[in-house]
Image (cartoon, rainbow, N blue to C red):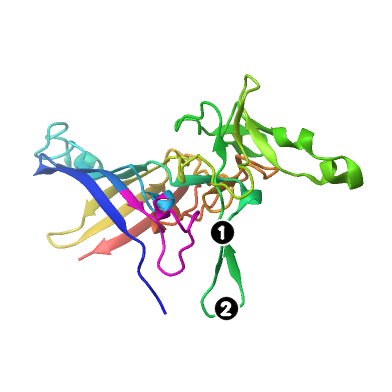
């Protein structure tokens, strides 16, 4: 038997500005400011933090992006016959300077919402339909101090980056109350998050309770990509021309940082809390998040007729 207990909503403001082609220039700019809320980011199995309080699951969905900017344009360079510069250039020079075109495509988007969890404090386990398996519902930590939504910032280090610079994990304060017999205190692996002033900011909730930090509290690294191209058309006759072109993919060579943690889930009890291990390939929940982050040059030529 299946039910439909979940719900979600999406609201957005969309702005688009287009510059029609004139004087060899055309451009388009689009901006989306949105908010995607719900209890689960995918179809199918849904497990609640607290079965008696479904509202605790209401949060930003993993495919949510607060801001998304996209722009593209082309510019015919103003050189050659009937153009602003070198309009009366002699034949050979005119052929060299005419029909150059510059183009570009840009995208910038804010990061994927991240869920900070306390993995050792789950209170609900959900069976998987048709399987001999259960899904643990990650609990959230207790918030005990100032942990602003702006706390996440990529800080490159020797191999990778730290996303929560100024914060570090320490032994959970509850550890000191654990008995030392049979190495129980040594085996206690719960951690807590401490700020630069030594204050405990996040900690594991007591057994059987739900943490007070909201799900998807903070956003992961923002992403930007700028591709550009330059092409030259050489006229052969009235209907034929030869085109040479260079495309530069990711001309800024901007690092495309993965999210810290595992698929947007950051565990305060993990030894690598807040660590970003690579910037080459990211596997985001949106297809737009999947790409290589190396600058590439692509040279091509073709005959148009």
Instruction: Identify the residue shown where x is 71% and y is 32%.
Output: 173
Q: Residues within 10 Å of mark 2 (few under 14, many from 20)?
A: few
Q: Is residue 114 magenta?
A: no
Magenta span of residues: 36-55
Instruction: Identify the residue shown where x is 45% and y is 40%.
Output: 217
Q: Nearer the viewer, residue 158 or 54?
A: 54
Split into 4 quadrants, where in the image is the C terminus?
A: bottom left
The residue furthest top is: 197
Disc 1 target residue: 124
Q: Nearer the viewer, residue 281 or 214?
A: 214
Question: Is there CB contact under 8 Å for labels 1 and 2?
Answer: no
Cα separation, mark 1 vs mark 2, equals: 18 Å
The numbered dot on residue 131 is 2
Q: Judge from the rendering whether residue 161 lies leftward or rightward of residue 48; answer left or right.
A: right
Task: Work out whether residue 172 can be spotted.
Answer: no
Q: Judge from the rendering whether residue 272 lies leftward or rightward of residue 109; answer left or right.
A: right
Give above or below for 10 relative to 272: below
Mark 1 or mark 2, whichever is nearer to me? 1
Q: Earlier in the sequence, mark 1 or mark 2?
A: 1
Q: Nearer the viewer, residue 264 or 195?
A: 195
| Residue 64 in picture, x, y percent from top left | 36, 49
Q: Nearer the viewer, residue 189 or 18?
A: 189
Give above or below for 66 relative to 54: above
Q: Judge from the rendering whether residue 104 lies leftward or rightward of residue 195; answer left or right.
A: left
The numbered dot on residue 145 is none
């Amino acid at each position: 038997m299946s039910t439909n207990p979940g719900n979600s909503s999406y609201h957005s403001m969309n702005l688009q500005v287009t510059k029609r082609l004139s004087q060899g220039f055309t451009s388009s700019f689009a901006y989306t400011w949105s908010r995607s809320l719900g209890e689960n980011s995918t179809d199918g199995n849904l497990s609640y933090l607290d079965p008696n309080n479904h509202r605790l699951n209401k949060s930003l969905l993993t495919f949510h992006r607060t801001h998304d900017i996209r722009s593209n344009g082309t510019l015919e360079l103003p050189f050659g016959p009937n153009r602003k510069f070198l309009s009366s250039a002699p034949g050979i020079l005119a052929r060299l300077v005419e029909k150059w075109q510059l183009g570009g495509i840009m995208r910038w988007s804010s990061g994927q919402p991240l869920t900070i969890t306390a993995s050792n404090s789950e209170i609900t386990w959900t069976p998987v339909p048709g399987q001999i398996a259960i899904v643990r519902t990650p609990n959230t930590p207790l918030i005990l101090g100032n942990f602003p939504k702006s706390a996440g910032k990529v800080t490159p280090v020797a191999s990778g980056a730290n996303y929560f610079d100024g914060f570090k994990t320490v032994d959970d304060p509850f550890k000191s109350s654990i008995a030392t017999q049979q190495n129980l205190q040594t085996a206690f692996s719960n951690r807590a998050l401490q700020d630069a002033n030594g204050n405990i900011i996040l900690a594991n909730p007591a057994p059987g309770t739900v943490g007070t930090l909201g799900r998807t509290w903070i956003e992961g690294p923002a992403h930007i990509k700028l591709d550009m191209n330059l092409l030259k058309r050489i006229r052969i006759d009235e209907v034929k021309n030869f085109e040479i072109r260079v495309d530069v993919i990711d001309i800024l060579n901007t690092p495309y940082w993965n999210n810290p943690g595992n698929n947007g889930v950051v565990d305060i009890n993990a030894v690598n809390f807040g660590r970003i291990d690579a910037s080459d390939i990211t596997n985001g929940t949106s297809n737009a998040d999947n790409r290589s982050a190396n600058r590439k040059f692509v040279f091509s030529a073709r005959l148009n007729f």
